Image: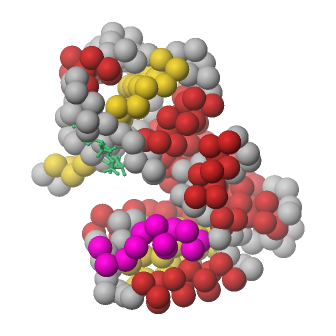
């Protein structure tokens, strides 16, 4: 039976570190702040934003929520981003996705100043990451790497398979694993025989958004299985991996909930701290 990668416990440890550093900076007169823009009233987005804000406050960050109606114009949204970019008290800016269809998501994400881009989605930060310059990584893949590191799971020289190629999870996940010297394969919706590819994995990271996509047939015995998926099925949160059948085969496995999700929020706080220190030219 695979051992559980306990994201909740690891997130608590990261948050305790961040809290200590944020407190030291506040004592030195540097009060860091995270600003979140929420457009519309999508219930899942509202829940994620609440959780991010609560966690920010818990670690001592100031937090600012900018709520805009679902029919907000792109120009008004961009003007809000500009305002936060120009505010010296704001260290991190996050625009909760998805945005309504009439808004050009790329235009909005590119408007965030790269030095306040806590999600690491700006092309400048994506480019810096690609060529190995210091930057912040998107929170979810950064959280997965932190999870593997904290559990002492070495990825160097091992075969990692990432299922999913989004800019938010799949692609940066693959880049991070590559940077950590894994041999990396990326699978996606056009991969003909998914199970044949995933069975090659020593480390399998699944970020698709389809409940139960990965079953025991997809997993090599002894593989480490990280389930990024967050799907609502009958009101319950469930991953992309069929936990019941895969857990007995894997060496390590993340649960959903309680796996990657809490680490994503923790890394958001860590990124806010990193960017705040860099912009203010202070050390925590
Ligand atoms: P996207 O919808 O942007 O990307 C999904 C990816 O999965 C695409 O690359 C797509 O391929 C691929 N895919 C779709 N169907 C299949 C299939 N049958 N076989 C193989 N690949 C397939 O999603 P995200 O990357 O944003 O999110 C993925 C999941 O992770 C979601 O469940 C989301 O809720 C969750 N998530 C969880 C977070 C957390 O904190 N735990 C944070 C962010 C996301 P193609 O490119 O060919 O279309």
For the image, the number of numbered tags is: 0
Whether 34 is drawn above or below 198: the answer is below
Image location (x, y in percent) of residue 79? 54, 87
Whether 239 is drawn above or below 41: the answer is above
Using the rendered view, name the quadrant where residue 103 is placed.
Answer: bottom left
Residue for point 43% across, 26% down: 185
Image location (x, y in percent) of residue 3? 41, 20
Residue for point 84% across, 73% down: 29
Whether 200 is drawn above or below 177: the answer is above
Dividing the image into four quarters, tell me where ligand 1 lies: top left
Residue for point 22% across, 27% down: 192
Q: Which of 151 and 105 is in front in this view?
A: 105
Q: Say left or right for 108 vs 248.
A: right
Image location (x, y in percent) of residue 236? 20, 49
Image location (x, y in percent) of residue 268? 57, 56
Q: Which of 131 and 216 is in front in this view?
A: 131
Using the rendered view, name the quadrant where residue 110 is placed.
Answer: bottom right
Asked if one can make out residue 235 in the rendered structure from this viewpoint, the answer is: yes
Using the rendered view, name the quadrant where residue 83 is placed.
Answer: bottom right
Looking at the rendering, in which quadrant would you find the N terminus? top left
Q: Nearer the viewer, residue 155 or 253?
A: 155
First to last magenta residue range = 101-112
Residue for point 39% across, 42% down: 165
């Amino acid at each position: 039976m695979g051992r559980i990668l306990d994201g909740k416990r690891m997130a608590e440890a990261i948050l305790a570190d961040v809290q200590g550093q944020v407190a030291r900076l506040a004592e030195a007169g540097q009060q860091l702040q995270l600003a979140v823009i929420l457009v519309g009233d999508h219930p899942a987005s509202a829940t994620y934003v609440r959780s991010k804000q609560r966690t920010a406050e818990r670690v001592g960050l100031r937090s600012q929520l900018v709520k805009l109606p679902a029919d907000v114009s792109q120009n008004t949204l961009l003007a809000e981003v500009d305002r936060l970019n120009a505010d010296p008290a704001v260290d991190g800016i996050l625009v909760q996705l998805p945005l309504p269809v009439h808004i050009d998501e790329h235009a909005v994400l590119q408007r965030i100043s790269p030095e306040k881009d806590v999600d690491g989605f700006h092309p400048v930060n994506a480019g810096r990451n690609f060529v190995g310059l210091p930057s912040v990584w998107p929170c979810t893949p950064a959280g997965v790497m932190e999870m593997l590191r904290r559990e002492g799971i070495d990825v160097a020289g091992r075969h990692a398979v990432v299922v999913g190629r989004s800019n938010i999870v799949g692609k940066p996940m693959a880049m991070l694993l590559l940077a950590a010297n894994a041999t990396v394969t990326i699978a996606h919706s056009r991969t003909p025989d998914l199970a044949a590819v995933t069975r090659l994995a020593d480390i399998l990271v699944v970020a698709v958004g389809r409940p139960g996509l990965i079953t025991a047939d997809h997993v090599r015995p002894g593989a480490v299985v990280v389930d990024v998926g967050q799907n609502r099925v009958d009101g319950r949160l469930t991953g992309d991996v069929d936990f019941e059948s895969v857990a007995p085969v894997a060496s390590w496995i993340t649960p959903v909930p309680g796996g990657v999700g809490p680490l994503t929020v923790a890394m958001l706080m860590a990124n806010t701290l990193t960017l705040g220190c860099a912009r203010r030219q202070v050390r925590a």
